[in-house]
Image: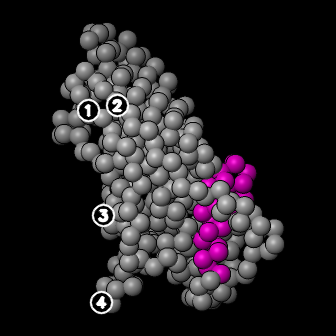
């Protein structure tokens, strides 16, 4: 078995569990810091932390943080060649490590713009959790990403005559209704949650309340996304939301106000920081049983697609933690 901590050789159950907990407690802060760096736009530091996390997790057999480190790398824009472990590894993993593995697979589909498969995988994670109560800092983002995947699937389908979107709209409504609760419980998810709520109101609207109300609600959520990102120092989240707003101003279907001078200046400032991330260094991650011989040099995925740019607004797909996205 590849993911097997050294503690498993100890017959004393308490000592074994203590060993596992010690390893997880050591790796958890690294992961949380790495994710914050991604949201803050500090991608070089995020890449370093992810490498550290993966090496530590590989050494000590921490499957959860091994997959979590890969997930954070993917969000930072370094999309490595995706490797599915064999069945024995999956069967031996904890529920959380299985969810993190599936998050990797879902995000891979999202990044290559296979939104249908991404939607199915994110939905499976959310369904597996059962309720939001069972979510944690590792899995809570699944709800936001599910909303993002459904939205983009609907928008891409509408660009292709003959593809129906009616079956997706109820699913979209249900998941968007949960996003405020996600943000309330996990503050770091607020910018993405509010951004997806804004997209929902802006695109679908609420016919019972009228178009003007719909756009007011969209702008309210958009501003809440900006404010929450600013409050937590998440500059990349803030940029993603302002990028949405900028796209809306240039889309004739979105009757939204223009940014004021302060907001426009802030958008230009953040946009000037969006230089392509340097490729992550090639690093070998080895274990006694060769889980992987190495991770290839992190590659940003192919941006080529027929999906219109305005549909993808809010997604810097090379640094895809928009969370719109």
Q: Is residue 130 magenta?
A: no
Residue 200 % position (x, y): 54, 74
Residue to which mark 1 is pinned: 293
Which element type, helix, strand or loop, lies under badge 1? loop
Q: Is residue 226 magenta?
A: yes
Whichever of callouts 2 and 1 sits on the residue coming sooner in the sequence is: 2
Residue to which mark 3 is pinned: 117
Task: Give the spatial CA distance, label 4 vs label 3.
Answer: 20 Å
Task: Give the spatial CA distance, label 2 vs label 1.
Answer: 7 Å
Q: Are marks 4 and 3 in contact (CB under 8 Å)?
A: no
Whichever of callouts 2 and 3 sits on the residue coming sooner in the sequence is: 3
Q: Are marks 2 and 1 in contact (CB under 8 Å)?
A: yes
Residue for point 29% across, 9% down: 10
**What range of the chain is rendered magenta?**
225-249
Which one is closest to the eye, mark 1 or mark 4? 1
The label number, if any, that marks residue 162 in the structure image: 4
Residue for point 39% across, 84% down: 158
Picture layout, residue 100 above or below residue 116 = above
Most extreme residue toward the right, as rendered? 261
Task: Give the spatial CA distance, label 1 vs label 3.
Answer: 28 Å
Q: Are marks 4 and 2 in contact (CB under 8 Å)?
A: no
Residue to which mark 2 is pinned: 284
Within 10 Å of disc 3 (Cα), the crowding (few <14, some 14-19, many 20+) is some
Residue 126 % position (x, y): 39, 54
Whichever of callouts 4 and 3 sits on the residue coming sooner in the sequence is: 3
Whichever of callouts 1 and 3 sits on the residue coming sooner in the sequence is: 3
């Amino acid at each position: 078995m590849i993911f097997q901590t050294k503690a498993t050789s100890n017959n004393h159950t308490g000592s074994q569990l203590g060993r596992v907990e010690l390893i997880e407690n050591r790796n958890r802060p690294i992961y949380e810091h790495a994710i914050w760096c991604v949201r803050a736009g500090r991608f070089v530091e995020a890449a370093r932390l992810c490498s550290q996390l993966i090496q530590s997790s590989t050494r000590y057999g921490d499957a959860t943080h091994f997959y979590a480190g890969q997930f954070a790398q993917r969000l930072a824009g370094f999309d490595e060649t995706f490797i599915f472990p064999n069945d024995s590894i999956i069967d031996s993993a904890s529920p959380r490590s299985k969810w993190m593995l599936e998050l990797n697979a879902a995000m891979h589909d999202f990044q290559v713009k296979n939104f249908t498969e991404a939607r199915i995988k994110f939905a499976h994670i959310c369904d597996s959790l059962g309720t939001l109560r069972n979510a944690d800092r590792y899995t809570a983002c699944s709800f936001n990403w599910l909303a993002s995947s459904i939205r983009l699937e609907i928008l891409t389908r509408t660009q292709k005559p003959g593809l129906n979107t009616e079956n997706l709209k109820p699913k979209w409504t249900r998941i968007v209704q949960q996003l405020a609760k996600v943000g309330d419980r996990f503050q770091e998810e607020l910018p993405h949650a509010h951004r997806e709520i804004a997209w929902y109101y802006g695109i679908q609207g609420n016919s019972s309340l009228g178009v003007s109300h719909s756009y007011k609600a969209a702008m309210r959520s958009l501003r809440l996304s900006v404010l929450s990102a600013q409050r937590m120092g998440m500059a990349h989240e803030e940029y993603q939301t302002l990028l949405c707003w900028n796209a809306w101003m240039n889309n004739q279907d979105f009757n939204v106000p223009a940014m004021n001078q302060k907001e426009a200046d802030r958008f230009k400032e953040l946009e000037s920081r969006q230089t392509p991330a340097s490729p992550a260094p090639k690093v070998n991650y080895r274990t006694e049983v060769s889980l992987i011989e190495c991770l290839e040099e992190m590659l940003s995925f192919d941006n080529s697609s027929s999906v219109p740019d305005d549909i993808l607004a809010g997604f810097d797909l090379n640094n895809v933690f928009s969370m719109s996205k």
